[in-house]
Amino acid sequence: MKPILVTGATGNVGARIVGRLRARDIPVRALSRNPPPDSVRGDLAKPETIAPVLDGVDTVFLMLSGSAEALLPTVSLLGERVKRVVFLSSGAVDDSLAEQENPIGAWHRMVEEAIENSGVDWTFLRPHGFAANTLGWAPSIRSDGVVRGAYGEAAMPLIHERDIAAVAVEALTGDGHAQAKYVLTGTRPLTQIEQVRIIGEAAGRPARWEEIPLADARAAMLAKMPDFIVDTMLTGYRALGDRPGEVTSTVEEVTGRPALDFEVWAADHAAAFGVASDS
């Protein structure tokens, strides 16, 4: 069997894809800009660093790293060299729109279109909110058990990165996934208030949400992210407060087992919030 190239191989999703493929004794070429000893070095924004690692490769797991525009030359290279690309896109992509309104959706749709035009068989994974995004709350929960923000009632079905990896592995190794657009979610919508409580329970310490003025929440977010990302996120939270994110059954349909509950994710990551889990 030819090796599968996994980009972003040290990330939350990529590392789990690598682990699952190796557990199946499937050859893997794990690529990262700063690779561990069992991986290869490459930068997706520099196709000249990608070309050498494509020798003998037919299938690639691809993710957006940096700007969408910078990834396009590498997509063109993949079109010349490989047969199948599984792309970690975003649930922000809206196929009903001729022009994406959400900047995150626009970036990922740009890459999707390039892949579609490249001539490869493709599968797009479109996960909605990553449960791993709540790791940003870890310092606050470790400090005083309080997460401060806006739109605590925003409800979304956060997905475990293990589920994204499980779907990716099926798409990378199985048949019947060509030209599929898989919208991935967790099992049920949970408000940010509920997410904090569940994390606290898993970490073995009380944790709660504290609603603060929108301007204060925005200012805190701007210290970590560009303004257009912050405003996109806050707009999304506001909408999710009125209409919780919809749940899909795609994880189960592709993998044969249900998606993992947020409680499982919280237990898996309890150590990051202060107390290691026994699970």
Image: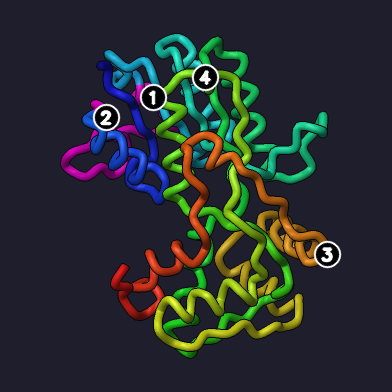
Q: Nearer the viewer, mark 1 or mark 2?
A: 1
261 is higher (above) or lower (below) than 216: above
Q: Amino acid at mark 3?
A: Asp
Q: Picture coordinates of residue 269 (x, y %)?
A: 39, 67
Image quarter where the C terminus lies is: bottom left
How many neighbours does mark 3 have within 10 angstroms: few (below 14), some (14-19), or many (20 or more)?
few
Residue 217 among those drawn in magenta: no
Q: Quadrant of the N terminus?
A: top left
Residue corresponding to mark 2? 28
| Mark 1 crowd level (few <14, some 14–19, many ≥20, 10 Å Cα) | few
Q: Kindly report the distance in space between the C-alpha atoms of the residues bearing marks 2 and 3.
A: 44 Å
Residue farthest along the left direction in this orientation = 37
Give the labeled residue for mark 4: 176
Q: Secondary structure at mark 4?
A: loop
For label 3, the residue is: 242
Q: Kindly identify the residue that appears in the image at 24 percent across and 38 percent down.
A: 23
Q: Which residue is mark 1?
A: 173
273 vs 104, left or right, is: left
Give the CA separation, mark 3 to mark 4.
37 Å
Task: Please state if 207 lies on the left or on the right of 16 as rendered.
Answer: right
Q: Quadrant of residue 225?
A: bottom right
Q: Identify the image quadrant of residue 209.
A: bottom right
Q: Going by the image, does 160 lie left or right of 181?
A: left
Look at label 2 and name its amino acid.
Val
- Residue 252, given in percent of the width and then of the height, sits at 53, 41
- Mark 4 / mark 2, whichever is N-terminal: 2
Name which residue lies at 38% across and 42% down. 14
Secondary structure type for disc 2: strand
First in sequence: mark 3 vs mark 1: 1
Q: Which residues are magenta?
A: 26-50
Q: Are marks 2 and 3 in contact (CB under 8 Å)?
A: no
